[in-house]
Amino acid sequence: MADLLRKPLASEGLVHAITAENAGWRYVGFELHRLAPGAAATGLTKDREAILVMVEGHAQVQAAGQDWGVLGDRMDVFEKTAPHCLYIPPAQSWEVTATTACTVAICLAPGRGDYPARRLGPDGITLTQRGDGSNTRWINNIAMEDADVAESLLVTEVFTPAGNWSSYPSHRHDEDDYPRITYLEESYYHRLNPPQGFGIQRVYTDDGTLDETMTVKNHDVVLVPRGHHPCAAPHGYEMYYLNVMAGPLRKWRFIADPDHAWLM
């Protein structure tokens, strides 16, 4: 079985530490920190660019030689308000000190240093509906390709109502053949509401050489190195995920599963 489902390392402190090396791919890295009031997390971007996402709670943030003040607004991710985020260039240090209990994501991908540190949101991030019927979900685009704010990173939040599907109809972005399709590795950081719930995510290729269906629980991460990757939220449980994508070209072009393309 492919090692696509990553369980939390701990309930507090450093919860996930996914690197391109331990994921077995080339581009995407992801860290998650859950901090009690007064606790701190630090890091150095090295040869990576980063987007810091305040998933929930408040924290004092210093990064790239600047004091960014207290970032954060929503105390629960399922409030669905726009997140406070920060772009951090390569070769820069960062420090987050919790002023309330908080959850902080660090999204990582290769960078050269072409973009300066800057706040991303909450201004300019609007909760937007995608799909309809049982395929309805709600999107907070943090740094997609229409925003010229990063070299490699594409980052977005998705809220899937109970009983609905998401990242669906099934699609893939695993070939470097722009404009037909782009190669993008992708990670999914999952949350469930209520937190004892679960969701389902399938990752599969057209030829069946990869076909894994996983039960995802609160704070799990799923890695998508290739193939299609739909999710489902069961009745009674809302699903959130934070997507991080990166590849050789910062464009999101995908191809639907031929069996389900009629749903597009």
Image (spheres, rainbow, N blue to C red):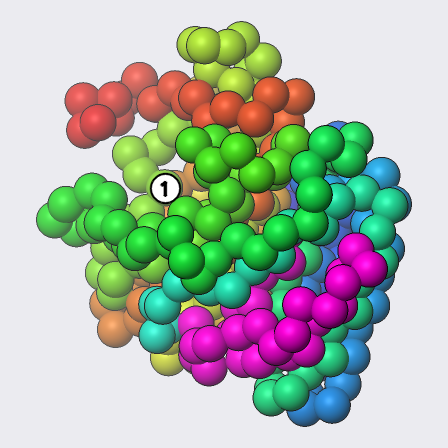
Name the residue tied to disc 1. 167
Secondary element at image label 1: loop
Q: Quadrant of residue 64?
A: bottom right
Can residue 34 be seen from the camera position used here? no
Q: Residue at x 39, y 28 (%)?
A: 171
Q: Nearer the viewer, residue 211 or 9?
A: 9
Q: Nearer the viewer, residue 189 or 222?
A: 189
Front position in the image: 156 or 99: 99
User: Residue 100, image x and y in percent?
Assistant: 60, 88
Question: Would you say the magenta stretch is mainly helix, strand or loop?
Answer: strand
> Residue 232 at x, y = what percent?
33, 53
Classify 10 Å Cα crowding around label 1: few (below 14), some (14-19), many (20 and above). some
Q: State the extent of the magenta-drawn residues as a range.
A: 51-77
* The image quarter in which residue 132 lies: top left
The amino acid sitting under disc 1 is Ser
Above or below residue 229? Residue 129 is below
Which residue sits furthest left? 133
Does 75 appear in magenta? yes
Name the residue at 79% across, 31% down.
112
Residue drawn where x is 30% and y is 56% of the image: 127
The residue nearer to you, when weighing 5 against 239, is 239
Q: Does the magenta portion include 30?
A: no
* Picture mark count: 1
Where is residue 222 drawn, in percent x and y?
Answer: 57, 50
Picture residue at 45% right of the left edge, 43% below the top: 202
Give the residue at the far front of this rendering: 66
Quarter in which the N terminus is drawn: top right
Horizontally, is 10 left or right of 145 in the view? right
Residue 41 in the image, given as x and y percentages of width and height = 79, 73
